[in-house]
Image (cartoon, grey):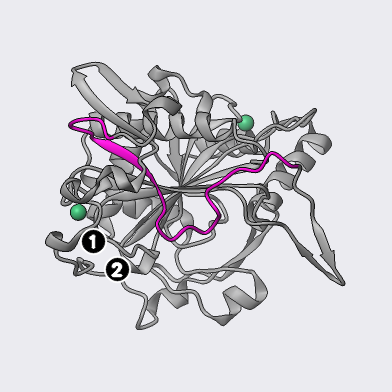
């Protein structure tokens, strides 16, 4: 790709409060290139997520099978927990190597103080969502496959938010080794935790402060101005818009937003699931084609679980896709400020297939 050299620029991200540096000369560095096909080498015969190896001993949490066209059949209830539905298409399992204990506690969670340090017990849930076919990655899913996947994610959110002491539900998919995926078989993960991560907390705080100061949703305003400007828009339909943010956190960072203000992902209607799946499918295909099938992460940022009189209605949920085309160095980690190698307007034009 030929990237025009322009003067570097600091850009401010109003939704996180972060500054980034956009410096296109860095695009020419030797390790920055759009990579060719990459693969994790792992033979299907040993894959723990293939249907022949998923047994009831793994204590499935829920599964989805499709009996007939236009009807999902979820098995969610406690009674069916631990069972595998025949011909499952998607199944949720407790993570074999969980980051959290995979249990809830009825007691109120307290922060323990140890001098200057604070500790919170690692209660919460860590689930793996496995999609049936080993060789069908999420960027090869059909419209219908994605609608089913999104409905499944939504159901897991609705189940997990009812657990005691859960404050934040984090959904993410890692694809490819550079994005941290340890298995090739298509899967996503959910962590339901008693605390927020720092990035999310900052994002939430910025949205709150914007609302307090200017009386509106920062994301709605960003969407509005991006739609007006058009340069960073990748595509849109009636309900959703996909764009590259004005001040991204990585090269080619892409976000998908519901156009109407909606604070919780799990509140999307079945009609919105169809619209969302359609945009997600096109974006994953666009990234696969234009960036030569890179590793990527995608995750959902949504309102925390409401406890007591909490009100997070000012937040605006969205999905973030981070294609792994560049590598972070010491500055990014130490300064907490990203150096972006391509102007977001150029990145959007490249993904849209313009010269
Ligand atoms: Zn497999
Ligand atoms: Zn909004």
Secondary-structure class at tag 1: loop
Quick check: marks 1 and 2 in contact, CB under 8 Å? yes
Circle nearer the N terminus (1, 2): 2
Asked whether the viewer can see residue 259, the reply is no
At x 52% / y 39%, what residue is drawn? Answer: 318
Q: Quadrant of residue 237?
A: top left
How far across and down, in percent of the image, does residue 159 sit? 51, 30
Q: Which residue is mark 2?
A: 34
Image quarter in which the C terminus is found: bottom left
Q: For residue 115, what is the image quadrant? A: bottom right
Tell me, yes or no, if residue 12 can be seen here: yes
Q: Nearer the viewer, residue 269 or 113?
A: 113
Q: Secondary structure at mark 2?
A: loop
Q: Is residue 107 above or below residue 120?
A: above
Of residues 194 and 173, the one nearer the viewer is: 194
Ligand 1: give its quadrant: bottom left
Residue with the mark numbered 1: 292
The N terminus lies in quadrant: bottom left
Q: Does 259 sit above or below residue 333?
A: above
159 or 244: which is nearer to us? 159
Q: Which residues are magenta?
A: 84-107
Task: Kindly report the secondary structure that dominates the magenta region of the rendered protein.
Answer: loop
- Establish if 90 lies above or below 272: below
Residue 312, position as x, y percentages in the image: 71, 32
Q: Is residue 94 in the magenta section? A: yes
- The residue under the point 36% across, 69% down is 178
Q: Is residue 337 magenta?
A: no
In percent of width and height, residue 114 lies at: 83, 69
**Residue 320 appears at what percent x and percent y?**
47, 48
From mark 1 to mark 2, how far is it between C-alphas?
7 Å
Label 2 CA crowd tier, 10 Å (few <14, some 14–19, many 20+): some
Viewer-proximal residue among 253 and 191: 191
């Amino acid at each position: 790709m030929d990237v025009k050299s322009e003067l570097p620029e600091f850009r401010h991200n109003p939704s996180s409060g972060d500054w980034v540096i956009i410096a296109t000369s860095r695009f020419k560095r030797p390790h920055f290139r759009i990579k060719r096909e990459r693969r994790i080498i792992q033979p299907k015969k040993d894959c723990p997520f293939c249907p022949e190896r998923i047994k009831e001993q793994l204590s499935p949490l829920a599964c989805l099978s499709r009996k007939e066209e236009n009807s999902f059949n979820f098995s969610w209830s406690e009674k069916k927990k631990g069972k595998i539905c025949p011909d499952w298409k998607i199944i949720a399992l407790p993570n074999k190597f969980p980051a959290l204990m995979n249990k809830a506690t009825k007691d109120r969670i307290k922060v323990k103080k140890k001098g200057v340090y604070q500790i919170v017990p690692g209660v919460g849930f860590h689930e793996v969502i496995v999609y049936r076919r080993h060789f069908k990655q999420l960027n090869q899913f059909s419209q219908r496959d994605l609608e089913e996947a999104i409905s499944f994610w939504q159901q897991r959110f609705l189940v997990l938010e009812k657990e005691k002491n859960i404050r934040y539900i984090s959904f993410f998919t890692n694809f490819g080794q550079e994005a941290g995926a340890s298995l090739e078989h298509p899967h996503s993960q959910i962590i339901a935790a008693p605390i927020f991560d720092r990035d999310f907390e900052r994002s939430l705080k910025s949205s709150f402060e914007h609302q307090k100061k200017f009386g509106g949703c920062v994301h709605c305003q960003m969407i509005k101005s991006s739609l007006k400007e058009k340069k960073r828009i990748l595509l849109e339909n009636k309900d959703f818009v996909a764009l590259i943010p004005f001040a991204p956190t990585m090269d080619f960072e892409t976000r998908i937003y519901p156009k109407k203000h909606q604070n919780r992902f799990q509140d999307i209607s079945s009609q919105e699931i169809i619209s969302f799946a359609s945009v997600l499918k096109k974006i994953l295909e666009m990234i696969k084609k234009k960036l030569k099938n890179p590793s990527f992460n995608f995750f959902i940022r949504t309102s925390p679980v409401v406890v007591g009189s909490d009100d997070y209605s000012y937040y605006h949920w969205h999905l973030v896709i981070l294609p792994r085309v560049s590598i972070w160095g010491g500055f990014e980690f130490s300064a907490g400020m990203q150096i972006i190698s391509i102007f977001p307007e150029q990145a959007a034009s490249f993904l849209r297939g313009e010269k």
